[in-house]
């Protein structure tokens, strides 16, 4: 293999590394690192495969006035946007393609397809499960597996009843899924073909060395990755570290040559030699269309992908971006949450005026100084109490239909008839049908469950909690619980912080089986908001707000502290099932908050619980997880 051909091959290797950003196919390498791209070992949070989607067209749009349309594909932290569809009489056609990085915990997640019109207004959307896409048979043309779904209004996926005939159009695409093992084999075959001087399917030592050198320019982190321990991945057998070692192991018959089959089979046994980014970039370059084009990547949510120039300008002027929201909570210009049920990141809907006011009060020095004034805190207290009284007035009943529509409340889940609510607060503290919130593993008392519908963060201890989420300068267990003696039992234990927004179901339930052994008096007097804007500020929200502390003694988990925290506009915390001596089963109703946002904080004893991995991963990115009451929180680790 001559010098000229070697340089050409190296140039191709470098181009492969740049393929994602150059052609607009994927999230850039830096974003992939945040998703686990830096991981060398095939761990739970590493890539297990790549799902390739060829976006075809939308047929049968009910409203012909849409004109040009575009689609947004969202999966986890990856969001892609197509170009404008070509106009046609009955369909809008793209022929664009994207490649989705799949991690192990996402195998049961969903891909969200959204279609927008020329004015950037949502036409319709639908979800397709990863399992459904992976289960499809692979024909010879791997990108020619048909996938289709009907598009519906957004409220359809928030519990609104609908008929199939109500669809707004039909989205069509093609899909193929490649496992990590398939990608490894394909990647090494690609390098092998580049280095094969005689095209005879065999490499001698010299050609093999040149081939092996091609992969190092692919990703800058590779040299550091080689030095990392791979014991967990390959056991005690030392892996090959350079071209000579690999050649000797691959040349099983010792004939001085290595075939592509010998090489690819060996490389599957040593997956650490291919970083996730190498494999992902290879797939982006390998699966392509002569007529199609790559979608735009690098977005985190469909709101960001569908934003116009005015939004992008405001984002730039504010020197804030979505990636900050992933790693620094409310320090970003947007509050992002991970929808656990569907596996996508959502931008929390909040009034621009309210958002600006909260940031001015909690994230500026002048605003925080105003919170020290007795007149400010008194005003917040009086406002919350007055708001509570207003929502208890019979006239407040008129707000219920508008609230349900604005917040997309799933009224089919509500236990009582809608006309039975005499006030807005009666509706706000509504009960749900038992089947609306099933308990995870109902026969397994060693499985802790979510106590409420909320945006959740979990942390292994209070130090980690303060590192990633709670920034109150005086936050501590004894201040949270209001008693040093109580706090002593929970030193070094895990915390779960459940933030309830106004649109959430506002009753809270038992997270574990056990007996209520302590039910303290109401402590705290402030009514600060529990929005991340405040929690992520130096204001001591969780240790100064009005709250009630309870201790549940669980046969499985030991003592569990359950703290009900009020907030702005929350005048009343009602605890009906937390009287001392009460026996609780997971899912039992323990109480409710009247109108407003609020928070439940759970503190476990050290070594009592292992939180679910996806919850920990999100929390370590300062990202809340949207959960429903009854789904899994974690498993007991006490013997």
Image (spheres, rainbow, N blue to C red):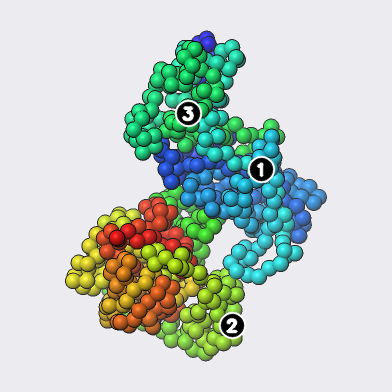
User: Quadrant location of residue 160?
Assistant: bottom right
Label disc, if present, on residue 267 of the rendered structure: 3
- Between the C-alphas of marks 1 and 2, the distance is 47 Å
Under circle 2, the secondary element is: helix
Q: 486 or 289: nearer the eye?
A: 486
User: Quadrant location of residue 523?
Assistant: bottom left
Q: Are marks 1 and 2 in contact (CB under 8 Å)?
A: no
Which residue carries the number 2 mark?
418
- Which sits earlier in the primary sequence, circle 1 or circle 3? 1
* Quadrant in which the C terminus appears: bottom left
Mark 2 or 3, closer to the camera: 3
Residue 317 in the image: state x and y as whole percent.
Answer: 46, 51
Rate crowding at label 3 as few (under 14), some (14 to 19) or many (20 or more) other CA atoms within 10 Å. many
Q: Is residue 312 visible?
A: no
What's the residue at 49%, 16% (across, down)?
A: 253
What's the residue at 39%, 78% (across, down)?
A: 590
- Which sits earlier in the primary sequence, circle 1 or circle 2? 1
Label disc, if present, on residue 137 of the rendered structure: 1
User: Quadrant location of residue 22?
Assistant: top right
Label disc, if present, on residue 71 of the rendered structure: none
Q: From the viewer's perspective, is 227 left or right of 269?
A: left
Residue 119 in the image: state x and y as whole percent.
Answer: 66, 55
Whether 329 is drawn above or below 440: the answer is: above
Residue 51 in the image: state x and y as whole percent.
Answer: 58, 43
């Amino acid at each position: 293999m001559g010098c000229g051909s070697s340089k050409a091959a190296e140039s191709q290797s470098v181009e492969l590394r740049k393929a994602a950003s150059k052609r607009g196919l994927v999230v850039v390498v830096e974003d992939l690192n945040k998703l686990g791209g830096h991981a060398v070992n095939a761990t739970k949070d590493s890539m297990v495969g790549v799902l390739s989607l060829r976006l075809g067209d939308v047929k049968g749009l009910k409203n012909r006035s849409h004109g040009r349309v575009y689609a947004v594909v969202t999966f986890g932290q990856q969001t892609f946007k197509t170009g404008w569809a070509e106009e046609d009489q009955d369909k809008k056609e793209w022929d664009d393609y994207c490649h989705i990085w799949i991690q192990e915990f996402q195998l049961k997640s969903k891909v969200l397809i959204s279609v927008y019109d020329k004015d950037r207004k949502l036409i319709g959307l639908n979800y397709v499960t990863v399992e459904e896409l992976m289960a499809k048979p692979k024909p010879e043309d791997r990108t020619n597996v048909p996938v289709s779904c009907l598009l519906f209004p957004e409220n359809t996926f928030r519990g609104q009843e609908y008929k199939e005939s109500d669809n707004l159009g039909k989205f069509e695409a093609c899909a193929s899924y490649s496992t990590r093992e398939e990608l490894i084999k394909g990647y090494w075959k690609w390098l092998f073909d580049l280095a094969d001087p005689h095209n005879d399917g065999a490499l001698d030592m010299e050609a093999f060395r040149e081939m092996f050198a091609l992969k190092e320019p692919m990703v800058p982190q590779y040299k550091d990755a080689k030095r990392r321990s791979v014991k967990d991945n390959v056991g005690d057998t030392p892996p090959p570290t350079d071209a000579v070692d690999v050649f000797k192991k691959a040349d099983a018959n010792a004939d001085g040559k290595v075939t592509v089959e010998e090489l690819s089979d060996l490389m599957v046994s040593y997956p650490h030699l291919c970083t996730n980014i190498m494999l992902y970039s290879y797939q982006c370059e390998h699966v392509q269309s002569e007529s199609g084009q790559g979608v735009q990547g690098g977005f985190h949510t469909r709101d960001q992908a569908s934003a116009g120039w005015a939004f992008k300008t405001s984002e730039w002027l504010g020197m804030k971006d979505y990636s900050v929201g992933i790693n620094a909570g409310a320090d970003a210009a947007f509050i992002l949450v991970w929808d656990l049920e569907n596996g996508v990141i959502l931008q929390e809907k909040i009034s621009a005026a309210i958002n600006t006011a909260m940031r001015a009060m909690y994230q500026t020095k002048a605003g925080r100084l105003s919170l020290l004034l007795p007149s400010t805190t008194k005003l917040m207290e009086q406002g919350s109490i007055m708001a509570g009284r207003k929502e208890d007035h019979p006239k407040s009943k008129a707000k219920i239909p508008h609230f349900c529509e604005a917040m997309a409340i799933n009224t089919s889940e509500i236990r009582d008839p809608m006309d039975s609510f005499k006030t807005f607060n009666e509706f706000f503290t509504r009960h749900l049908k038992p089947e609306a919130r099933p308990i995870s593993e109902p026969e397994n008392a060693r499985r802790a469950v979510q106590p409420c519908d909320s945006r959740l963060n979990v942390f292994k201890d209070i130090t980690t909690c303060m590192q990633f989420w709670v920034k109150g300068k005086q936050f501590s267990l004894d201040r949270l619980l209001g008693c040093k003696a109580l706090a002593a039992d929970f030193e070094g234990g895990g915390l779960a912080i459940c933030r309830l927004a106004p649109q959430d179901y506002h009753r809270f339930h038992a997270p574990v089986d056990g007996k209520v052994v302590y039910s303290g008096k109401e402590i705290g007097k402030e009514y600060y908001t529990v929005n991340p804007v405040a929690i992520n500020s130096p204001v001591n929200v969780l240790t100064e707000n009005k709250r009630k502390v309870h201790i549940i003694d669980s046969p499985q988990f030991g003592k569990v502290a359950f703290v009900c925290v009020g907030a702005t506009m929350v005048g009343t915390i009602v605890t009906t099932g937390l009287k001392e001596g009460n026996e609780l089963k997971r899912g039992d109703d323990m109480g409710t908050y009247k109108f407003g946002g609020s928070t439940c904080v759970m503190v476990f004893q050290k070594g009592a619980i292992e939180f679910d991995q996806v919850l920990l991963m999100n929390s370590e990115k300062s990202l809340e997880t949207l959960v429903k009451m009854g789904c899994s929180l974690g498993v007991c680790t006490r013997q």
